[in-house]
C-alpha cells in the first residue's frame, strides 16, 4: 500500500477514536465511530484476497448495523427526553438499545458471531488493530453512559465469557482462537463495568498488552494454524520458551500479569454478593485456559511434522521490529507485583 494512503488511513483511525473520546454529543460520537469503521476498511481489503474482501464486507455490514442502531437510539433518547448529551441518558429504552449496539460493535456474545469470521480473513497486523484499537471508542461510550440496566450487562458478560471459552476449544486457526479469547476477555470487562468502571479500564489495558504481545509473536513466526507453531523452535528458540508464559498470562494464571484483572474482578463481584456469577466466570476461565495450554503444548512440546504437507517453511530472518515485542512481552509477564499501584491509581 502507498505510504501516503496508509498514513491518511491511520490518521483517520486515530482521529475517529479521538473524536468519540472527546464528544459529549451523540451525533459527534456516532461520527467518530463511522470514521473509525471507514478508515480500517481499506486496510482490511488491501490484499485483494477473496477471504479478505469477504471479511471486510461482513465487518462493514455489522458495523453499519450497530451504527444505525446507535443513531436510532440517540434520536429516540432526544425525542423522549430532549437531550443529546451522552451523560444525560435517563430513559431505559435508548440505554438498552445503545448497550446492545455497542456490544455488537465490539463483538460481545450473543452478537459476537461476526468477530471470529472477520478476524480469520485478515492478516495479523490488521487483526491486531481490530482486536485492540477498534475496541477503544465503543468502550469509551459504554463507560460514559454507565448503563443502569444491570441484568443485561451481567447476561452479556457471562454469555461472552462462556462462549469465548467454548468457541475456542475446537479451533485450529490461531486468528479464530484469538477472536474467541477477545470475546471472553470483553465478557470479564462488561461483568464488572457497573460496579467499578476503573477496573474495567484496567482489564482493557492489560488485555491490550497481552494481545499485542501474542499477535506479534505469531507475526514473527508467520504462524496461522496450531500446526505451524511447531516450527517456531527453529526460528526463535528464546521467544518460543517465553510464549507459553504470554499465553498463560492471557489465561489468567498467577504469578503473571493476566491474573491481576481476573483476581480483582472476582473480588469485586464477591463484594457485591454475586458469588454465583463470580463462580461461573471463574469456571469459564478454565475453558479459555484449556486452549491456551493447547497452544503452549503445540508450540513448545511437539516436534514439527516431517511429512510433505508439514515441511518447515523457508526461514528468512524476519524484518519485524523486535522492540515492541520485547516491551509488550515483558509487560505481559511481569506486571503482577504492580497490582497495588494500579488499584491505587484507578481508585475513584
Image (tube, helix red, strand yellow):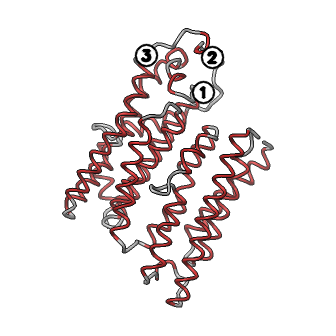
Q: For this rendering, which residue is in front, 239 or 142?
A: 142
Q: Is residue 272 left or right of residue 85?
A: left
x and y, in percent, of residue 232 in the image? 52, 20
Occupied quadrant, residue 347: bottom left
Q: Nearer the viewer, residue 322 or 122?
A: 122
User: Mark 1 and 3 residues: CB-CB less than 8 Å, in contact?
Assistant: no
Q: Residue at x 68, y 40 (%)?
A: 51
Q: Is residue 86 left or right of residue 12?
A: left
**Number of other residues with Cα within 10 Å of mark 1, as a class: few under 14, some 14 to 19, many 20 or more:** some
In the image: residue 322, left or right of residue 300 = right
Residue labelled with disc 1: 222
Nearer the N terminus, badge 1 or badge 3? 1
Disc 3 secondary structure class: loop
Say which residue label 3 marks. 302
Q: Where's residue 334, x and y in %?
A: 36, 37
* Residue plotted at (33% across, 53% down): 342
Q: Residues within 10 Å of mark 3 (few under 14, many from 20)?
A: some
Do labels 1 and 2 touch, CB within 8 Å?
yes
Quadrant that contains the N terminus: top right
Per the image, the residue denoted by label 2 is 313
Amino acid at each position: 500500500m502507498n505510504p501516503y494512503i496508509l498514513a491518511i488511513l491511520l490518521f483517520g483511525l486515530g482521529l475517529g477514536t479521538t473524536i468519540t473520546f472527546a464528544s459529549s454529543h451523540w451525533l459527534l460520537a456516532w461520527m467518530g465511530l463511522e470514521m473509525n469503521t471507514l478508515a480500517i476498511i481499506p486496510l482490511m481489503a488491501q490484499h485483494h484476497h477473496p477471504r479478505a474482501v469477504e471479511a471486510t464486507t461482513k465487518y462493514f455490514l455489522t458495523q453499519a448495523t450497530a451504527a444505525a442502531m446507535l443513531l436510532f437510539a440517540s434520536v429516540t433518547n432526544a425525542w423522549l427526553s430532549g437531550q443529546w448529551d451522552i451523560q444525560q441518558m435517563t430513559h431505559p429504552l435508548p440505554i438498552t438499545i445503545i448497550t446492545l449496539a455497542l456490544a455488537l460493535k465490539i463483538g460481545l456474545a450473543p452478537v459476537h458471531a461476526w468477530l471470529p469470521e472477520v478476524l480469520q480473513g485478515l492478516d495479523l497486523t490488521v487483526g491486531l488493530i481490530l482486536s485492540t484499537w477498534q475496541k477503544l471508542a465503543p468502550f469509551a461510550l459504554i463507560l460514559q453512559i454507565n448503563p443502569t440496566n444491570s441484568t443485561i450487562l451481567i447476561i452479556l458478560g457471562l454469555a461472552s465469557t462462556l462462549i469465548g471459552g467454548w468457541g475456542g476449544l475446537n479451533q485450529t486457526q490461531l486468528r479464530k482462537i484469538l477472536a474467541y479469547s477477545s470475546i471472553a476477555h470483553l465478557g470479564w470487562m462488561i461483568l464488572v463495568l457497573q460496579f467499578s468502571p476503573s477496573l474495567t479500564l484496567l482489564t482493557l489495558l492489560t488485555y491490550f498488552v497481552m494481545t499485542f504481545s501474542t499477535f506479534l509473536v505469531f507475526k514473527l513466526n508467520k504462524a496461522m494454524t496450531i500446526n505451524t507453531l511447531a516450527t517456531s523452535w527453529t526460528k526463535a528458540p528464546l521467544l518460543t520458551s517465553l510464549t507459553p508464559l504470554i499465553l498463560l498470562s492471557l489465561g489468567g494464571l498467577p504469578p503473571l500479569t493476566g491474573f491481576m484483572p481476573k483476581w480483582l474482578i472476582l473480588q469485586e463481584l464477591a463484594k457485591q454478593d454475586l458469588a454465583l456469577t463470580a463462580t461461573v466466570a471463574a469456571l469459564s476461565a478454565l475453558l479459555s485456559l484449556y486452549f491456551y495450554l493447547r497452544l503452549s503444548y503445540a508450540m513448545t512440546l511437539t516436534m514439527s511434522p516431517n511429512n510433505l504437507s508439514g515441511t518447515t517453511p523457508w526461514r528468512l530472518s524476519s524484518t519485524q521490529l523486535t522492540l515492541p515485542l520485547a516491551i509488550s512481552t515483558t509487560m505481559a509477564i511481569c506486571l503482577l507485583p504492580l497490582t497495588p499501584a494500579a488499584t491505587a491509581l484507578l481508585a475513584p
